[in-house]
Image: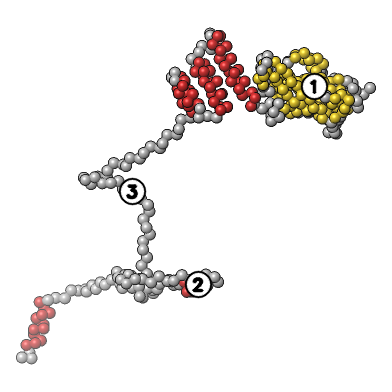
């Protein structure tokens, strides 16, 4: 039996020849990373092991004298601690009421704002133009008495003037002008006084009829000066015999140093006063719309530059108008 084993081995070498070369291939191992990356897992971090930022505790804050520390809220039974409630949602548009089919209903009706009351003047004009003058008068009665008079005077002018032929109908234009003058007469006693013109004159014969002096012509000492003034809105007061126009005046003359210069008293020529006062009363058969005042005075005896100022008041003394200082010169002998 020991002779048979070498023969079997020799037969295996003959039947299975070995290759002439043997190739061994293998991939080189990757170089090791000096700092391997930490392994990550898909699990959530454990709050118990994850470091948390320090919480701000009221007890750790410095106390301010005179203040109280707020108490820490304690969670109720069944509540979860350290859980903050989400902020309330922003105010949204109210939802429309749903219909039975799941669709939004119509918008709710909003009452329109109340209309502003109509001014009385518009209502009065509308009633008057519609031929209802009695109703127009009832509307006007809600105004003050002076306003009633003015509106009643202007209503016919507005109604007729809107449709009249102001170019080819002179009779209608004359009627409208007379109605406007009547309305103006109602306003004049309440309007502010106005002094339209102040001038030194050599001759005066009436309203608007005067001869002015040259501005650079000086006066001689003790010469007579004529000062002309035109006044508007003075008005005329009715009297049993007609009308009267009444005005009070106060005149000041000052030298170059703004010192008052004495004048002859218009009421007593034997006296001299620092302020000359006088009044003009003019009775007429018809009311005056154009009124003028003439003041005659003796110029100062000393040469120099002077100014004159006039203040006018109506008969009641409530309405006042004053001129600007008017310059005049007195030459030497």
As helix, strand or loop, the secondary structure at mark 1 comes to strand
Residue 60 on image: x %, y %: 48, 74
The relative height of residue 9 versus residue 303 in the rendered view (above or below) is below
As helix, strand or loop, the secondary structure at mark 2 comes to loop
| Mark seen at residue 7 | none
Q: Mark 1 points at which residue?
A: 295
Within 10 Å of disc 1 (Cα), the crowding (few <14, some 14-19, many 20+) is some
Considering depth in this image, is 54 or 32 the residue closer to the camera? 54
| Residue sitting at x 33%, y 73% | 46
Q: Mark 2 points at which residue?
A: 61
Residue 202 on image: x %, y %: 82, 16
Q: Classify residue 197 as left or right of residue 115.
A: right
Q: Classify residue 21 as left or right of residue 296.
A: left
Q: Classify residue 304 as left or right of residue 57.
A: right
State the CA–CA distance, disc 2 to disc 1.
Answer: 92 Å
Q: Of all residues shown, which one is farthest toward the front?
A: 240
Q: Nearer the viewer, mark 2 or mark 1?
A: 1
């Amino acid at each position: 039996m020991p002779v048979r084993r070498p023969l079997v081995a020799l037969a295996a070498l003959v039947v299975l020849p070995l290759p002439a070369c043997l190739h061994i291939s293998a991939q080189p191992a990757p170089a090791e990373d000096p700092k391997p990356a930490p392994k990550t897992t898909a699990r959530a971090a454990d709050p118990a092991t994850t470091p948390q930022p320090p919480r701000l505790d009221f007890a750790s804050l410095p106390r301010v004298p005179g203040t109280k520390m707020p108490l820490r809220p304690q969670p109720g039974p069944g509540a979860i601690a350290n859980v903050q409630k989400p902020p309330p949602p922003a105010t949204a548009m109210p939802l429309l009421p749903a219909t039975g089919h799941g669709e939004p209903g119509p918008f709710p009706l909003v009452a329109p704002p109340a209309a502003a009351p109509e001014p009385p003047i518009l209502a009065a004009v509308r009633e008057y133009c519609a031929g209802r003058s009695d109703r127009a008068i009832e509307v006007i009665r809600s105004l003050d008495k002076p306003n009633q008079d003015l509106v009643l005077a202007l209503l016919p002018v507005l109604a007729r003037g809107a449709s009249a032929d102001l170019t080819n109908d002179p009779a209608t234009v004359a009627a409208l002008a007379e109605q406007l003058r009547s309305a103006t007469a109602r306003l004049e006693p309440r309007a502010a006084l106005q002094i339209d013109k102040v001038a030194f004159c050599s001759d005066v014969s009436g309203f608007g009829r005067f001869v002015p002096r040259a501005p650079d012509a000086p006066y001689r000492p003790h010469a007579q000066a004529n000062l002309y003034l035109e006044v508007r809105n003075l008005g005329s007061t009715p009297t049993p015999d007609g009308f009267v126009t009444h005005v009070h005046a106060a005149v000041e003359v000052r030298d170059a140093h703004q010192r008052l210069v004495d004048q002859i008293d218009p009421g007593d020529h034997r006296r001299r006063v620092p302020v000359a006062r006088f009044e003009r009363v003019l009775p007429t058969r018809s009311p005056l719309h154009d009124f003028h005042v003439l003041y005659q005075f003796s110029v100062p005896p000393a040469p120099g530059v002077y100014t004159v100022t006039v203040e006018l008041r109506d008969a009641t003394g409530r309405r006042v108008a004053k001129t600007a200082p008017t310059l005049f010169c007195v030459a030497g002998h």
